[in-house]
Amino acid sequence: MKPIQVGLLGIGTVGSGVFNVLERNQTEIMRRAGRGIEIAMVADLDTARAKAVVGERVRVVNDARAVIADPDIDIVVELIGGYGIARQLVMEAIEAGKHVITANKALLAVHGTEIFAAAHQRGVMVAFEAAVAGGVPIIKALREGLTANRIEWIAGIINGTTNFILSEMRDKGLDFEVVLKEAQRLGYAEADPTFDIEGVDAAHKATIMSAIAFGIPVQFDKAHVEGITKLAAQDIRYAEQLGYRIKLLGITKRAEHGIELRVHPSLVPAKRLLANVEGAMNAVVVHGDAVGTTLYYGKGAGSEPTASAVIADLVDVTRLHTADAAHRVPHLAFQPDCMSDQPVLPMSEVVTSYYLRLRVADEAGVLAQVSGLLAGAGISIDAMLQREAGEGENQTDLIILTHSVREGTMNDVLAKMQALPAVLAPIVRIRKEELA
Amino acid sequence: MKPIQVGLLGIGTVGSGVFNVLERNQTEIMRRAGRGIEIAMVADLDTARAKAVVGERVRVVNDARAVIADPDIDIVVELIGGYGIARQLVMEAIEAGKHVITANKALLAVHGTEIFAAAHQRGVMVAFEAAVAGGVPIIKALREGLTANRIEWIAGIINGTTNFILSEMRDKGLDFEVVLKEAQRLGYAEADPTFDIEGVDAAHKATIMSAIAFGIPVQFDKAHVEGITKLAAQDIRYAEQLGYRIKLLGITKRAEHGIELRVHPSLVPAKRLLANVEGAMNAVVVHGDAVGTTLYYGKGAGSEPTASAVIADLVDVTRLHTADAAHRVPHLAFQPDCMSDQPVLPMSEVVTSYYLRLRVADEAGVLAQVSGLLAGAGISIDAMLQREAGEGENQTDLIILTHSVREGTMNDVLAKMQALPAVLAPIVRIRKEELA
């Protein structure tokens, strides 16, 4: 049988990985897929670079539309990134009846609804294992491996750059800015690291997982997004003393009145496996009502780990493209006519627990005032840590871990707490997840 | 559309879990599968127990063959266990053109070749996600999620009973026999725990993973199987002092001249996630050439975690049964006509590193003799620990960690070492895996 014909749009880091791994492991992959998989055409603006990767045997063009228009191409792999031209090309490829594979989480988190609807209409597959956690087959686990379960929550370290930075801050006791520069030097952070360090990339991925887990549309605009730029080294230290590590988590959770969808730094108990995921590695914890807690770990980025996921999608499409469209795995795990309209909750409705750091005057009665405000709002204290004021100091740090409470309630209390004369600096508030 | 009709053979712990989870999450599961999944018939020798679980609406019979013979049944779920009647019934169900789902690792590890050949011949699916690591979708990860990769090795904690016992031995410093009794009392170990503690259950699972990872037939008879019954509390302590934990690992590895397939206690660096998997939990590490190291973690046994895997298979079969058989995921990940004949290596050809504990006379020259034997065979020493002899003692423990060596070579050296007059007791040898 003729190999299935693949057209690559963009051949940078991931595209080269796809080409090289397909070439290196072609026998092994064909033994699995039952059919050859051939990159027949590559579009890249930099045709010289593309030719340097793929050699003479593959057609290289500078116009992505030539790939889409080619009647021999069965599958289009979009590796351009971003919401702009990538979106148009994906829509055009679907319109042309091509199956599409993409690693573009930003595109799917923002325009997924439109894209999946078009694909459903046209009877083609859009596969996106590489969009979340690189080579870790987490999309497959959620869409196929855990279908028995009512998923209760997902919490993941899904951005390697920020996890590398947080690991370094903790290991070396350094501040964010210092470690960021180091990460940029080592290639773990980009020259413009905004999407990573502000939590946007993690929120794209959390949005996609949320849709698949709960059968809701992708709704990136409803996600709460908070990065790690304001994290202080001292909070990492205090957390450690209390038995916690601070990780940037992407969280999505089924609550009584809707779905939580949020990315922010979180204290995680040090004994959890997730707390021990270090460096640029990714890990996702999924809690289902039948299976309990499961965890998936691996490299979340890089040329070949991401290529591993893209090629798994290529094999899936090769295996499944002859099946009638109604019997394929639905794009968002649930059948398109069975989506839920549960709302994504505003942050004030989220229920979680908190780490608070207050810079307070070292004088009698402060603790009573602070704990009185918490008690008044029905917030109970889980643990407390008061740094002893140094010789000659007249202020100190008061660290409080609370039990769970609605964030709106906590916001009100924090406003009152901040207004206390004995509270001398802006209160630091970091959320805490027990993941039990 | 009429729900797909399922017949259960055996409704004990796992069967009840399947029934209850299907019932509880039926809406959610149907939204995913695109079709209802209905347990229409149950066969169990204990019909009263079966009726107590499934109520009045489901037909209960005491003859499994009545389920297989029923023309309305699309899928037969075998939950009887063992190699005996289960094997006959699975073969008969296949012959009758039913898709089969089984959690029976023993059956597949021993008779898988025959079963999968029959299923291929008859054009039906045999799905077995529940056979390895309970609810963790590791079969799916290997067969579908990592298809891009040349798998290099797999190492897993795939028996919860033994991991619970090892965790307790370490935590409480207790001996094997004491903890086993406790585990039996708590229901973590069976009344006859032989299959678990002797490593047989783990070897069944490792055999299945080995076949899927490397495209070789299931060959349980070639597996090296060693349990934890001879592990001493002191070795767990010494390992800890050297920065390691002892786990019962199922290992399969691609070597130059064949495939390693072995289950035995192993030292694992304490900093690895796998070393931190405690209690009855399971975890499998898979190393692929493109993706690098990935890990999958969760509950490896129990009613609902196992049911989670069985139902995932039910959803898969429901989604895929209309596809032509040639385009389904092959049973053993590779197409049946593309299997490899790489041999499973004898244990003497396995290359690994070692922990050795020698009870030696506390006298000059012993260390020189021992290290001389190692050096003579080209085995280099990675670390050493000598317990100081107590007041009035004339013997002591000498602990050695070696670098990698062929096991045959190590066996020769150990024989010579054991013959040294200064070596006063049988040498303890535990293998060590860096999992790097």
Image (cartoon, coloured by chain):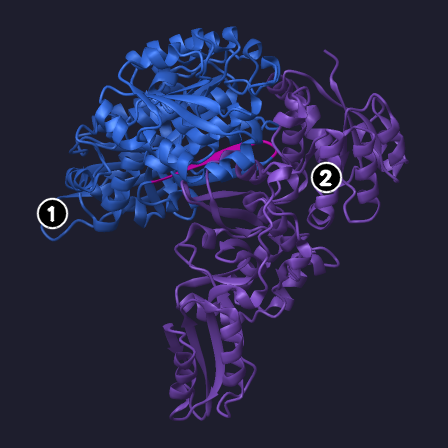
Chain colours: A blue, B purple
**Looking at the image, residue A365 lies above or below residue A346:** below
Q: Is residue A65 left or right of residue B93?
A: left
For badge 2, the amino acid type reads: Ala
Residue sitting nearer the eye, B295 or A210: B295
Q: Which residues lie in the magenta part?
A: A281-290
The image shows residue B43, relative to residue A338, as above or below, that is below
Q: Secondary structure at mark 2?
A: helix
Q: Is residue A87 visible?
A: no
User: Residue A416 location, x and y as percent?
Assistant: 26, 25
Q: Chain of mark 2?
A: B
Please name the residue that numbered disc 1 is placed on. A393
Magenta stretch mostly in which secondary structure? strand
Could you say whether the residue bearing mark 1 is in a helix, strand or loop?
Answer: loop
Q: Quadrant of the N terminus of chain B?
A: top right
Q: Quadrant of residue B185?
A: bottom right
Q: Quadrant of residue B372?
A: bottom left
Q: Amino acid at mark 1?
A: Glu
Residue A284 falls within the magenta-colored stretch = yes
Q: Quadrant of the C terminus of chain B?
A: bottom left
How far from the left and from the top, in percent, is residue B230?
61, 70
Residue bearing mark 2? B117
Q: Is residue A49 visible?
A: yes
Position of residue B282 measured from the top left corner of the image (x, y, whole percent): 56, 48
